[in-house]
């Protein structure tokens, strides 16, 4: 076999598969970054591989959850709720939802220990934008950021934390907290990283770590959704 035939036989199918992985609407196992922020703690924060499939909840039974719900997409694909269901199975937490009647979807009532109340509800943000449709209608594509946020409709800010991930012991470093909603990235003052002081008007706080090892930081503010986790290795 010449080099060209080798490429035709192996490289092309591989390329086609790679492209399929990157386009929305193809129902192939797709990797997304999933974060689930419960009332008092983070329920899940890691990549997950998902594809469109049926989802079963105690209160809604078995329903399709592949983006074709309510004819939202012409072809099946991975969705925000299929990602939730796959993470639940992998990480060993449960969730529940009731039929979202007219939308042919599942209205999520509870994830892990965090259930909706009369005034607080689970919401979904895709790449920091509220999804315009329910979680079985909203398809996702590779490397999307899927965020299930409790009390999503009442929080002041959706915190996003950034900063250095490798520091020397005692070295001063600046961390930044912004509001990720709609990718506006507006600085958030008064956020805590659990160590040191609060962020200033520019969303910045300077910290130094006296102990070596891995420090996992999350920004919090009482009225806001806690941030992503930033792992800082101190050497
Ligand atoms: C998936 O759910 C639909 C209802 O939404 C049902 O008609 C179908 O039989 C289910 N498929 C499987 C494989 O369970
Ligand atoms: C979260 O913490 C508050 C205050 O301690 C408590 O009232 C509430 O029940 C907790 N929520 C969950 C889901 O554990
Ligand atoms: C975010 O964007 C949506 C439209 O995608 C808009 O309706 C909403 O007002 C925006 N909110 C903020 C705080 O920018």
Image (cartoon, grey):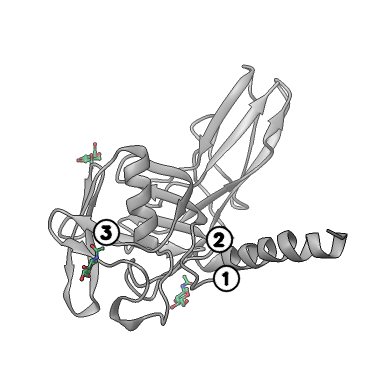
Of 202 and 53, the residue lying toward us: 53
Q: Is mark 2 within 8 Å of ligand 3?
A: no
Of 137 and 151, the residue lying toward us: 137
Q: Earlier in the sequence, mark 3 or mark 1?
A: 1
Q: Are marks 3 and 2 in contact (CB under 8 Å)?
A: no
Q: Position of residue 235 (x, y in %)?
A: 71, 20
- The local crowd at label 3, few if under 14, some if 14 to 19, many if 20 or more residues have their Cα within 10 Å, is some
Q: CA distance from mark 2 to mark 1?
A: 7 Å
Q: CA distance from mark 3 to mark 1?
A: 23 Å
Judged from the image, the secondary structure of the residue bearing numbered disc 2 is: loop
Q: Position of residue 130 (x, y in %)?
A: 42, 69
The quarter holding residue 131 reads: bottom left
- Give the residue at mark 1: 23
The quarter holding residue 39 reads: top left
Please tell me whether residue 132 is drawn above or below residue 193 in the rendered image.
Answer: below
The quarter of the picture showing ligand 1 = bottom left
Of 187 and 110, the residue lying toward us: 110
Q: In the rendered view, does 114 fall on the left or right side of 142?
A: left
Q: Which residue is located at x 19 percent, y 80 percent?
A: 102
For this orientation, the residue located farthest to the front is: 1
Q: Which residue is located at x 72 percent, y 59 percent?
A: 10
Does the image show residue 120?
Answer: no
- The local crowd at label 1, few if under 14, some if 14 to 19, many if 20 or more residues have their Cα within 10 Å, is some
């Amino acid at each position: 076999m010449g080099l060209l035939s080798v490429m035709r036989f192996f490289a092309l199918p591989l390329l086609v598969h790679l492209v399929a992985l990157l386009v929305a609407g193809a129902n192939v196992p797709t990797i997304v970054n999933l974060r689930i922020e419960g009332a008092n703690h983070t329920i899940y924060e890691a990549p997950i591989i998902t594809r469109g499939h049926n989802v079963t909840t105690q209160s809604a039974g078995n329903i399709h959850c592949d983006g074709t719900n309510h004819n939202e997409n012409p072809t099946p694909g991975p969705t925000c709720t299929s990602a939730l269901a796959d993470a639940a199975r992998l990480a060993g937490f449960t969730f529940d939802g009731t039929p979202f009647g007219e939308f042919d979807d599942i209205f999520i009532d509870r994830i892990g220990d965090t259930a909706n109340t009369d005034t607080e509800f689970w919401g979904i943000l895709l790449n920091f934008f509220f999804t315009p449709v329910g979680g079985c209608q909203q398809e996702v594509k590779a490397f999307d950021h899927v965020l299930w946020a409790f009390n999503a409709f009442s929080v002041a800010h959706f915190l996003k934390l950034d900063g250095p991930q490798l520091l020397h012991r005692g070295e001063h470093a600046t961390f930044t907290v912004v509001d990720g909603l709609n990718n506006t990235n507006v600085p958030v003052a008064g956020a805590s990283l659990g160590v040191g002081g609060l962020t200033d008007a520019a969303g910045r706080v300077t910290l130094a770590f006296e102990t070596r090892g891995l420090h996992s930081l999350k920004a919090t503010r009482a009225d806001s959704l806690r941030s992503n986790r930033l792992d800082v290795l101190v050497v």
